[in-house]
Image (spheres, rainbow, N blue to C red):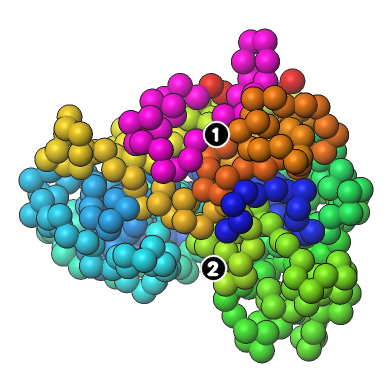
Amino acid sequence: MAQHFSLAACDVVGFDLDHTLCRYNLPESAPLIYNSFAQFLVKEKGYDKELLSVTPEDWDFCCKGLALDLEDGNFLKLADNGTVLRASHGTKMMAPEVLAEAYGKKEWKHFLSDTGMACRSGKYYFYDNYFDLPGALLCARVVDYLTKQNNGQKTFDFWKDIVAAIQHNYKMSAFKENCGIYFPEIKRDPGRYLHSCPESVKKWLRQLKNAGKILLLITSSHSDYCRLLCEYILGNDFTDLFDVVITNALKPGFFSHLPSQRPFRTLENDEEQEALPSLDKPGWYSQGNAVHLYELLKKMTGKPEPKVVYFGDSMHSDIFPARHYSNWETVLILEELRGDEGARSQRPEESEPLEKKGKYEGPKAKPLNTSSKKWGSFFIDSVWGLENTEDSLVYTWSCKRISTYSTIAIPSIEAIAAWRHIINLGKSYQDKLRRPSKVNLAFEATFPPGCLLILERAPQRNYLWTTNLQDSLQAIQKQLATIQILHWS
């Protein structure tokens, strides 16, 4: 990475859609996702109806950064060195003595010390985004049920049923066919589940375009669902904001696959058409690969090595592959930076009133937070057996991956778009933080790579707060504990 990162120096700015440009109302969308899968398991696979009953307290189990061992049904929270900090069997947390016997202080068997551990495997699944988290709770409750029914069953084979539930609800034709529960409900009442982009974001995107930046939208959502989301959050003219729109990108394969493995395809009425030997002009496409896209970006910018930055919320699908395979700069959208209050924040003007009731009236979720009572903080944790000692606090594996693969991390697109007093170019990073000046383009800030960026509002002034991930754990813990919720004016 460069010594400093500047959006102004980037020729191309790319965005993921779900949970990046499009923010979801998590207390509504999480139960919808859970119910979509649970109903399939009960009706199609014969699972117990008890899975359909979820209490608000059950949602405390959901925490980003957990690994599910598909063979033994254990959920694990890993330290940056691969040791197990906490674990549960299903939803039942392991006591320290059980944890010590099961895992000791050695690396977890599937851990790769170079932090390149794949997040998807036939042996484990890593939960790193808000679309996944309801599935974590469902899987944990399935393990509880199977353990109870089979007198302490030690190995499990339920994952194929979870995959079937996902495919039933999210397959390419599901939106058009009104298949499953998820898409029909989103179509019926988008305002209940989606937050419209505030005007600050729309203005910032237009500023980027007017400044000559090439804007990309790269999403694994299919074109019909992408269109619904974008029209709701950005308006019917959303295509004017983007030079290239890529749907059904099938990330991370979009970045890791060769052009021959994943060619671009044209679209007609949201149906995929012919495969293209290359990408020759801007437009709306399906599938594809980063290699052919970069060749197009060279033509569009007239530069042999245009600089690209990509915003995304998933380490597995967005940040790691964009950085590792394509050498793009990456900005991780990490709502956990808001603190526990962040996931609760909701601008009333961004969504329709929740009094608007409809078909789906499932159990309401508690906000999905940075810290759960069961799992502790997303960022750091205590090593069991060393509590209250100098060596007790360690980074989590998730936190280490953020430091390794994201250029910077921010709580939301709104956070970076809403700031208009960002910082003269040409001064040192420290000087910019001390003496900000008002500029029109909110992308002219530079930050040291690997920093967490948290935007707050003080009573009399606005300011940027940053911390490098190499700062002391104790300092980060103290700072994260005092983060204020950001209310946009």
The label shown at residue 324 is 2
Mark 2–mark 1 Cα distance, whole angstroms, equals: 24 Å
Image position of 158 with respect to 465: above or below: below
Toward which corner of the image does residue 123 lie, by quadrant?
bottom left
| Residue corresponding to mark 1 | 466
Question: Where 22 falls versus 486 (above or below)?
Answer: below
At x 34%, y 47%, the residue is 396
Res 366 visible: no
Where is residue 256 shown, x and y percent of the image? 57, 76
Q: What residue type is labelled 1?
A: Thr
Residue at horizontal 83%, vertical 70%?
303
Q: What residue type is labelled 2?
A: His
Q: In which quarter of the image is the C terminus?
A: top right
User: x%, y% of residue 64?
Assistant: 42, 47
Asked where in the image residue 410 lies, by quadrant, the reply is: top right
483 on left or right of 20: left
In which quadrant is the N terminus drawn? bottom right
The answer to which of 66 and 46 lies nearer the viewer is 66
Residue at point 75%, 55% (across, down):
10
Magenta-colored span? 455-483
In the image, is residue 462 part of the stretch drawn in magenta? yes
At label 2, counting other C-alpha atoms closer than 10 Å, the crowd grade (few under 14, some 14-19, many 20 or more) is few
Is residue 53 found left or right of 347 in the rendered image? left
Viewer-nearest of discs 2 and 1: 1
Percent across and percent down for residue 79 are 29, 51
